[in-house]
Amino acid sequence: MSSAALSSVTGAVAGGSGFREYVNHPGYEVVAYVDGGFEPPPSDWIPVLDKAAGVPFGRYANSSAEQVHRAVTAARRAQPDWAATSSTTRQAVLREFARQLEIRHDELIALIIRETGGTAEKAEEELGQSVTQLLNSATQLTENAGDILPPYKPGKISLSRAVPLGVIGLIVPWNYPMSLAMRALAPGLAYGNAVVLKPAELTPIAGGQVLAEAAHAAGVPAGVFSVVPGDGQGTGQALVRHPSVDLVHFTGSGEVGRQIAAIAAASMRPAQLELGGDNAFVVLEDADIDRAASCAVWSSLWYQGQTCITTGRHIVLRGAAQAFTEAVADRVSRLRVGDPLREDVDLGPVITERQLARFHDGMVAPSVAAGARVATGGTRDGLFYAPTVLTDVTPDMPVFTEEIFGPVMPITVVDTEDEALALVNRHHSMMNSIFTGDHMRGLALASRLASNEVHVNDGYARHGGEGQQRAFTRRQWIGVQTTDVPYPAWAESRSPG
Ligand code: NAD
C-alpha cells in the first residue's frame, strides 16, 4: 500500500477543530510475523477501517494455513530454550516489551480510538492494562513455582513444580484487542510458553501488528511469539486444529467457543474459553438512586456496551423504579455520540453494521413491538446509535434474554428481592451488581447470586492476578526415593532358592 494514499485520509480525519491532537500515522500494514520475521502477504489486502470515519487507515491479509503451520512449528522448536532462560532474562524482555508500547503512547492511543471506535478514556485503559499486565507478569514469574508434597513413603522427597504448557494458540476478539491478547500473552511468555496469536479481523493492528513489533524490538526470541492475522474460518481454524498446539486460549462469542471446545475435546487437548454473559444490575428500594444511576449508565454504556462485563439487564424493585428510570434517562439523554477522536464525545460508533443490526433489529425492535417503551434513544445515524433506555421490559423479551452487546439499557421492575434473585440467576452472567443502602443486605443477596463476580454498590472487573500461574502452567510431580525400600517379593529380582 502506498502510504500516501492513507495519509490523506488520516489528515482529513484528525484535521478539524475540536479533534484531539495525536501523532498522525501514515497508514498501517499488517503482515504475518512468523519465527521472528515479518512476511509479505500471501493473499489480497483487506482494508482496516477507522470505525468512526468509515475509511481505511490500514490493511491486512489473511495468513495461510502454511504460515500458521510454520508459526506453530517454530514455537514448538523455540519454546524449550525460552523456558530454560533465567527468570531475570524473561523479566528483562517483558519489561522492555512494556517499554516499547509506552514509548509509542500517543500514536497507540490514536490507533486504538480509530481501530476500535472507543473513546480516548477507553484507549488509555486498554494500553494501560496491557503495559501493567506485562509488568505484573514480569514480577509474578519469580514467585513460588511449586510445592513440597507431604512424604507418603519413608525417604521419598516429592515436589510439585509448575512447568509451561508448551505452545499456546491465542484467539482474541475486537473489543479490547490489545489488552485481551496481553492477558494471555504476557503470563504465557512469563511462565515459559511460546504463543501464536490470531487477532480479530476488525482489529489486527492494535491486536497483532503492534504487539509483534514491540515484542521483536524487545528481544523476544524468534519463534517464541508469532502473529498470524486472518479470519476465523481459515486462519483461526488452522491454528485451533494444529496438532502441536497444547492449549487454545479463546476470548469471544459463545457460538465460536462451543466449536473450539468441541475441536479441543476431540483431540484431547485443553481449551480455555472466555465467553460472553448476560450481566444484571439489581437496584433495591433502599438504594442511593443517584449513585446507582451513575454506576448503571457507566456499566451499560462504557465503550457503547461492547464488553463481556457490560450490564445488559437492570432489575429494579418497584419502590425505586420511577426515580431510577428518570435519573438514568436524564443522564443518557445528555450523552454525546460521535467520532471519539473529538474531545466533546462520550460514545463512539457501534463496531459494524452487522453488530448494530443484530441488537437493534434482532432485540430492540421486537422488544418494543412486544410492549417495551423507549424512554430515550432508539435512533441511529449510520453506526452512531443513540444510547437507549427501555422501560416496561419483561423477562421474555429479547433485550432481556440475549447478550445485547450494544448501548441499550433495558429496565425490568420486580416486586421482591427473591424475584430479582431468580431473574439474575436464570441466565449465565459473569458479573452482577447490587445497589442497596444496607451493605449487609447487599452481602446477603450477593452470596445467593451464581456469578463468579458480584459487586455491592459498584460495578467493576479486573483481569490478571494470582490465578495466572495455574492457567498457563501445568503441575509436574517429581519424586525422589532417597532410601532403599522393599518392593513386593514377586517384583524383587531375587532368583528362587
Ligand atoms: P467472535 O467469537 O465472533 O470472534 C472472536 C475471535 O474468534 C476472532 O478473532 C475471530 O476471528 C475468531 N473466530 C471466529 N470464528 C472462528 C472459528 N470458527 N475458528 C477459530 N476462530 C474463530 O466474537 P466477537 O464478536 O469478536 O466478540 C464478541 C464476543 O466476545 C461477545 O460475546 C463477548 O461477550 C465476548 N467477549 C468475552 C470476553 C471475556 O473476557 N470473557 C471479553 C471480550 C469479549
Image (tube, rainbow, N blue to C red):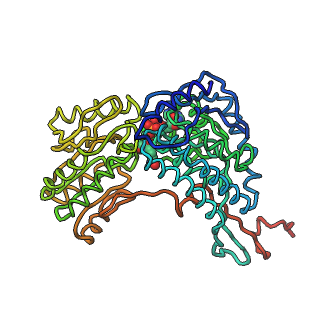
Task: Name the foreground residue: 273 vs 374.
Answer: 374
Is residue 256 visible in this depiction of the protein?
Answer: no
Whether 13 is drawn above or below 146: the answer is above
**Residue at (73% x, 49% y) in the render:** 219
Residue 120 % position (x, y) = 44, 47
Task: Name the quadrant containing residue 434.
Answer: bottom left
Residue drawn at x 51%, y 39% is: 260
Q: In this view, does 71 lie above or below 451?
A: above
Q: Can residue 95 be seen at all in this image of the molecule?
A: yes
Quadrant of image for the C terminus: bottom right
Q: Which residue is found at the position 84% from the left and 65% from the top?
A: 493
Q: Residue furthest bottom?
A: 154
Number of marks drawn:
0
Q: Which residue is drawn at 64% across and 36% down?
A: 242
Outermost residue to the top: 44
Residue 290: x, y in percent? 22, 59
Q: Is residue 422 left or right of residue 33?
A: left
> Residue 419 location in percent, x, y?
19, 55
- State left or right for residue 284 relative to residue 246: left
